[in-house]
Image (cartoon, rainbow, N blue to C red):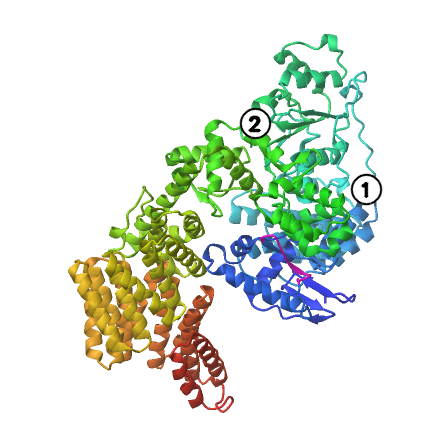
Amino acid sequence: MAGQSVEGGLRFAVLGPVRAWRDGQELDLGTPLQRSILGMLLLREGHAVTPNEMIDAVWGEDAPPRALGALRTYVSRLRTVLEPDRPARSRPELLTSIGRGYALRLPDGSLDLVRFERGVQDSESARKGGRLREAAEGLREALSLFEGEPLAGTVGPYSEHQRDRLVERRISVVETLMDVDLELGDHAKVVSELIALTADHPLREKLRAQLMLAYYRCGRQGDALNVFTETREALVEELGIEPGPELAALHQRILAADPTLAAAEVPAEEPVEEPEQRQAPQLPRPAQLPAAVNDFTGRKEVAVRLRTLLSAQSSAQSSAEGVPVIAVSGIGGVGKTALAVHVAHLAEDLFPDGQLYADLRGYTDEATVPESALGGFLRALGIPPDIVPDGLPERAALYRSILADRRILVLLDNARDAEQVSQLLPGSPGCAAIVTSRGKLADLPSARLIDLDVMEPGEALSLFASVAGAERVSAEHGAAMDVVAACGFLPLAVRIVAARLAARPSWTVASLVPRLADEQRRLDELRVGNLAVEATFALGYGQLAPAQARAFRLLSLSKGPDISTGAAAAVLSVSQFEAESVLESLVDASLLEAPAPGRYRFHDLLKLFARRQLDKTEPPEAKARALHRLLGFYLASAQSAHSLAYEGSMIPANIVTISEGLSFTSVDEAVAWLIAEGDSLFAAINQAAASAVAGEQLLPAGDLLVAMEPLLEAGTHTREFAQGTRAVLSAAQRLGDQGSELRSRYVLGRVLFADNQLKAAEGHFRVVHELSTARGEKIVTGEVLNALAVVVGRQRRHIEALELFDAAMRFYRANDVPAGEALVLSYSARDHLGLGRPADAIAAAEKGLALFTEIGSGAGTARARYHLGIVLSRVGRLTEAVHHHAECLAFFRASKQRVWEQRVCSRLAETFIAAGRHPEAVRHAEQALVVSREIGHPYGEALSLTVLGKALRGLGSTTRSLECLRQAFEIFSRLGAPEAGDLKALIEAIPAEGAVVES
């Protein structure tokens, strides 16, 4: 089997189905999603992959909100499969966590794709050495590793793209093999193979040309010409194009019986000598490159790419090709100069007439002027100092004249801008230039822009080991990864920390971790000798205009992972247009990153530097005002979102906004904004809770929690809600702020209710009601009465629940809130059912639906349909129940209300069970189970398992039914839910496992 190896150990295959073996035994790699994740890790060959990359690769645009949790589950399962004997809580050795991502450390030669590429490379070397038979055998052996369609059994955009790439790679190698066979004179043997290949790939002109040549060399000129005719007809019919020039030329040569087409020894090519007049012999060959970096590490892919860009045009003789100019930009300390020097040394053979180098010192107060740099270049090229022209235009003209017939590489380091380098670029093909700059030189004509990012985690670890000592680092691998992660994988920072460790034999790698964990000290730790990360950052910061510098400082205030244009405008107190302009200028200066349109973020170390400058420059009052503006923007935007998501609610009208925010045009847009900004919203809430010294500073955070209620229904940030509400509640109690206390307790009660902690939720709701009554605050008075009623009803205290619903109804009517009345009617229907009053339940639910419909509340109407569907299902009106639940399910899915989606799917399954439509019940129950697990909703998971168990029982699948019901019972018991007692009786009533024949 091609995917295995007689050598044993772990082996992996991607040139076919994604598979793995250990010591010859195939491993169970799980679901297609799990195999897709493994496939991506295998193809990255040890490089780290971030969770976001994996989610985009596997789910694409259809990623569920809790995709990150699912991803972590799949990774955990893969670790178990790959290292079944790994002790609990020990670090994985194969599928490792690196910084924010994951990497698969592959044993050498364990992946079939790597062995394939090595075989192809060895065969190409043999072919160049004239060992054609060896080359053909090697190519055939490499191709034998393919076992069908690459990455079969995997899903997602990444797999589709890589599958196409690997298929293309295979056929290109097949074409190479056919060329080698034809060079060997094996034309008769390859005819049948080429016939099959051209049938599979009818539009591939290379294969058609090879078949024509094979036919011709076999004396079958007519067949060769027929191939051309068939090819032309296929190309015209399928693509509307004529055959390419190579195929057309071969056709003409066959018609003319060109004798050079006959199989024969290919004469060795004579080396092409350079024209003697190309280089003026009296001029010296400059070699100004700085010394190569001995311990240069990583950057292999980008280095190969840059050398390829240079080699593609270094020998160009046509003016149409132009001069290759590569502009490398990036944050200070990212290794631009090291990379440029490394690539320049790699490309020495491409530029036999020498290399010129100039440090333009663009980010210092003593930047090199172009006239001075040109003077140095001219002297290096052999021009006597006394005849070097004075003016810039004259020097530039002479410089380009001297380079006109030469092949020289020019390296311009640390450029300030395009203006500084424009006169230093060669003007004739054959030469090339590499420019490094912190700024993105987008206005440099014809330049290939390379934005250099920080190192991959594995590369950073290799650099750390090369400086600090491989044995030392290997002995403390986990601590070493923590160190390079704290360095933000910035090469300069990694090198500095490694050098400090190398100079202190008594230190351990682990001793560095707490030093770097302290954000206040981290920049101070990143200095050794004359190297310092802070000094490097200061050079770029020192070039900023005042408005840019202020923005750079103030934007570091937010502790969110990134910031939107609108939020940045609030922090800076400018318009969004002005904010975008300054943000983009900071991106151009490599002081900010733009991970997505309209969103910006700092590198971790740059953010610490920016905060340090902020503390030096801005008074505490200015920082407090900026954070207050940010919180105000988030509050006003969330208020707008709440108004749309819950039409008719009195909450938005009782929120006092402190600034302007965004407005939205649809519920979908509003909820999408809340989800996208969720992490930043909670960061602002937690900052306000930590820094508030008075109630008026904390109250906007409490209001924001309440305004974010639609996000709670989305189920994407449950843990963050729990943390944020407790932070605000703690601060409110510390400050004696009852307004913030009642708001945070209300939302915390909602969080606890969702987790089925009914007693705890009830306790918080009762305190909220007491505080609201005592303070005369109406913001959540009706909502908390309604919530109390629901919690009490969940505990089957139905009479008490209806009394609370009546109190909520009186409040809403007194305050003229029809949406509140409709809410009470809809929710109270289930308690009427619980008391055996189905007619009252139907009347309440139908009146609630009518009220919401009249108001025009989409969310309210959907919830009313949900409750009405439950009531109708219980009284046997199943078709109507399915209709209402299908309608509200469409709304909840469109508005990304995952909690409600799970609930409706469960209820639909119950109705289908009642109707005896068990396959449909299983389908909806499984959908509910998937959603509940994705959003981390234990009570919903237990409900879904319960209804799934009942549906499976209806299908006769007793074993699976009991498994689901027992899992549900365990969850309900852990939550203290009354449903546990119901399930216990049901489980005991089901025949023992195996007593019923499985369907």
> Closest to the observer: 207 or 293?
293
Residue 973 visible? The answer is yes
Above or below for 832 versus 12: below
Q: Amino acid at mark 2?
A: Leu
Residue in view at x 68 percent, y 53 percent: 510
Q: Earlier in the sequence, mark 2 or mark 1?
A: 1
Q: Per the image, is 98 magenta?
A: yes
Q: Is residue 94 left or right of residue 441?
A: right
SS type, badge 2: loop
Q: Which quarter of the image is occupied by the N terminus? A: bottom right
Residue in view at x 84 percent, y 49 percent: 131
Q: Position of residue 851 (x, y in %)?
A: 19, 63
Which mark is nearer the camera, 2 or 1? 2
Residue 220 visible? The answer is no
Q: Position of residue 500 (x, y in %)?
A: 72, 43
Q: Amino acid at mark 1?
A: Val
Which quadrant would residue 535 be assigned to in this image? Answer: top right
Label 2 neighbour load within 10 Å: few <14, some 14-19, many 20+: some
Q: Which mark is residue 444?
A: 2
CA distance separating discs 2 and 1? 46 Å
Above or below for 831 versus 654: below
Q: Per the image, is 319 magenta?
A: no
> Closest to the observer: 214 or 267?
267
> Closest to the observer: 110 or 197?
110
> Closest to the observer: 170 or 767?
767
SS type, badge 1: loop
Q: Is residue 841 left or right of residue 193?
A: left
Q: Which residue is mark 1?
A: 266
Q: Residues in magenta?
A: 91-100
Q: Position of residue 620 (x, y in %)?
A: 44, 38
